[in-house]
Image: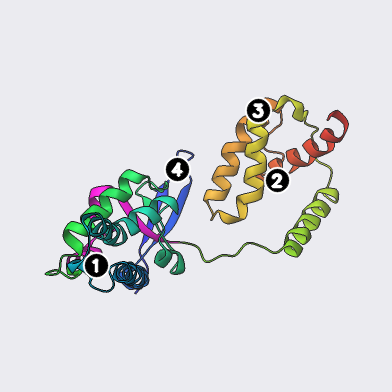
Amino acid sequence: MLDDELIIETPERVEVHYILANVGNRFLAAAIDHCIQVVALTLVLIVAGVLTDWSLFDSMGTWTLALTVLAVFGIYYGYFVAFETLWSGQTPGKRIMRLRVVREDGRPVRFFEVFVRNLLRLIIDLQPTFSYAVGVVSIIFSPRSKRIGDFVAGTVVVKERATEAPSLEEIIKISEIEQARFERAAPASFTANTRLLDERELRAVETFLKRRFELPEPNRSVLAARIAQPISAKLGIATDQLSPEALLEEIERQHRAQSRYFD
């Protein structure tokens, strides 16, 4: 069974692709979280037992009973709200399974969305009669693999890309390759006065060149053209001399060279 894909188009007309989490991944993440909850609840009850000489509710004072009930409720319900708010849509179980809750537009969840989706978890999904059946059925038949809480809160659960940060050696090697590429680049048919570009335009060029390999085609070429067109017009460069991406590379190279003299 192929994973469902969520495609979100940014204001720059660039499509961002997310892989939706399926029932199996979400079940395993929930199982891990519930195991952590059980351990935490057990510790609370042990502490309460020690404080009451193991008589528990028979000898508990009003405040001790109230604090114990509050702690149990906090672990049962507040666990998901606290972690998903502080960890930007993740709980320990979701982090282990590389899942994350995001808004339907791809932006990070806020406290409101987290609170609403988990309030519905408490009211519907975890009722003893349903035993998660409502949530599972909703995920299976929903086009975006949503449970009831996700529909109300406007959220989805997605898989994170299983990528690791490069090591220091890899970063140094990439930097050396990029520097060598700039140095051996063939002379361009134009000379640009990059001082005419403002900080926002230079940052757009730099950001694109750093992250372009993460973009699939044709989005990469389209974004390069959208950035290159106004910049080339501002610098008076004919756009037919180089491809948009090569033009941005040359502008970046010339900016670096000119910065040595004008900084």
Q: Which residue is mark 4?
A: 10
Along the viewing direction, whichever of 119 and 139 lies nearer the viewer: 119
Residue type highlighted by circle 1: Ile
Going from N to C along the chain, the mark reached first, 2 or 3, is: 3
Q: Quadrant of the N terminus?
A: bottom left
Disc 2 secondary structure class: helix
Q: Are marks 2 and 3 in contact (CB under 8 Å)?
A: no
User: What residue lies at 73% left-to-right and 59% top-to-bottom?
Assistant: 171
Element at label 4: loop
- Residue hosting label 1: 140
Looking at the image, residue 7 sits to the left or right of residue 71; the answer is right
Residue shown at the point (74%, 61%) measured from the top left: 168
Question: What residue occupies the far left of the structure in this picture?
Answer: 129
Q: Secondary structure at mark 1?
A: helix
Please identify the residue farthest to the right as the structure is shown: 261
Residue type at mark 2: give it. Answer: Ala
Q: Amino acid at mark 3?
A: Ala
**Magenta-drawn segment:** 134-159
Q: CA distance from mark 2 to mark 3?
A: 16 Å
* Amino acid type assigned to the residue bearing label 4 in the image: Thr
Q: Which residue is mark 3?
A: 233
Pointer 1 local density, CA inside 10 Å: few below 14, some 14–19, many at least 20: some
Does residue 239 appear left or right of residue 68 in this picture? right
The Cα–Cα distance between marks 4 and 2, rounded to whole angstroms, is 24 Å
For this rendering, which residue is in front, 57 or 44?
57
Kindly identify which residue carries mark 2: 246
As drawn, is 230 to the left or to the right of 117? right
Q: CA distance from mark 4 to mark 1?
A: 28 Å
Q: How many marks?
A: 4
Q: Nearer the viewer, mark 1 or mark 3?
A: 1
